[in-house]
Image (cartoon, rainbow, N blue to C red):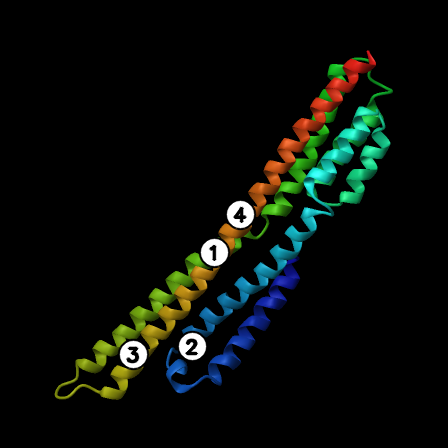
Amino acid sequence: MKKFIFILIFFVSVGVSYVIWDNSPEYLKQGGPLLVVGLTLLFLVFTYTIERAFVLWRAGGKGGVSTFMRNIKAAVQENDIDRAVEACRKQGGSLGNVVGAGLERYNMERTKLDNPKDLLEETKHAIEEATALEAPILERNLSALSTIASIATMIGLLGTTIGMIRSFHAMSHAGAPDAAALAVGISEALVNTALGLTTAIIAIILYNYFATRVDNYESAIEETSFEVLDLLRHSQGQES
C-alpha cells in the first residue's frame, strides 16, 4: 500500500470514527473521545485485511500447484524450457514468478556456460533473487496488524484506567457519591475495554491467518524450486 493512500485512508477512518462516535447512543458516547481512536484502529484492521487478502489472492496465481508442477515437469523432461517458462507466466503468482526467473536464467545461460554445475548455480542464484523479491510482498503489512493488536489492547486498558479514575473521583465526594459521574466513568471504562479487546482479537486472528498463508506460499516456493533444480540436473545428465 502506497504511503499517500495509507495517509488518506487513515484520515478518512478518523473522520468516519468521529461521526460514528458523535451519533452513537448515549451509553456508547460515554466512552469518550478515546473511542474515536479505537474505531480508527478497527477500520485500519479492515483496510489491511482487504489489502492482504487481495495481494495473497494474486500471489496464489492461476490453477493449482500440482497442475503447475505437472506442466513444468513435462516441459523440462522434454527439454522444452520455453514451454516451461510460458507455463510460469500463465501461472502468474509468486510461485510462477520465482520458478520462471530460474528457468529464464537457465535458458539464457545454457548456451554460454559449458559447465553444468555453473549453469545450475546461476539458475539457483536467479531463484534466490526472485524469492528475495517476492517474500517482502507476501509479508508486507503483517507487522501492521500485529502492531494494531497490541495498540488496541493498550487503548482499551487506557480507557479502562481513565474510566475508573473518573468513577473513583465521583465516589470520593463527601456524602452520597455522584451517581451520574460514577455511571459515566464505568461506561467509559467498559466501552473502551470492549472495543479495544474486540479490535485486538480480530487483528490477532487475521494476522495468524495471513501469516499461515504466507508460510504455505514460501514452503511451496522452496519445495517447487528444489524439484525444478533437481529436474534440470537430471535433464543435463540425460543430455550428456
Whole-number angstrom distance, CA of label 3 to CA of label 4: 38 Å
Q: Secondary structure under badge 3?
A: helix
Q: Secondary structure at mark 4?
A: helix
Residue 211 in the image: above or below residue 235: below
Kind of residue at disc 3: Gly
Q: Where residue 185 is drawn, which disc sits there?
A: 3
Residue on which the image places disc 2 = 33
Quadrant placement of the N terminus? bottom right
User: Which comes sooner in the sequence, label 1 or label 4?
Assistant: 1
**Sequence-first disc among 1 and 3:** 3
Q: CA distance from mark 4 to mark 2?
A: 33 Å
Residue 169 found in image quarter: bottom left
Q: Quadrant of the C terminus?
A: top right
Q: Position of residue 72 (x, y in %)?
A: 77, 33
The mark found on residue 205 in the picture is 1
Of residues 126 and 33, the one drawn nearer to the viewer in this rendering: 126
Q: CA distance from mark 1 to mark 3?
A: 30 Å
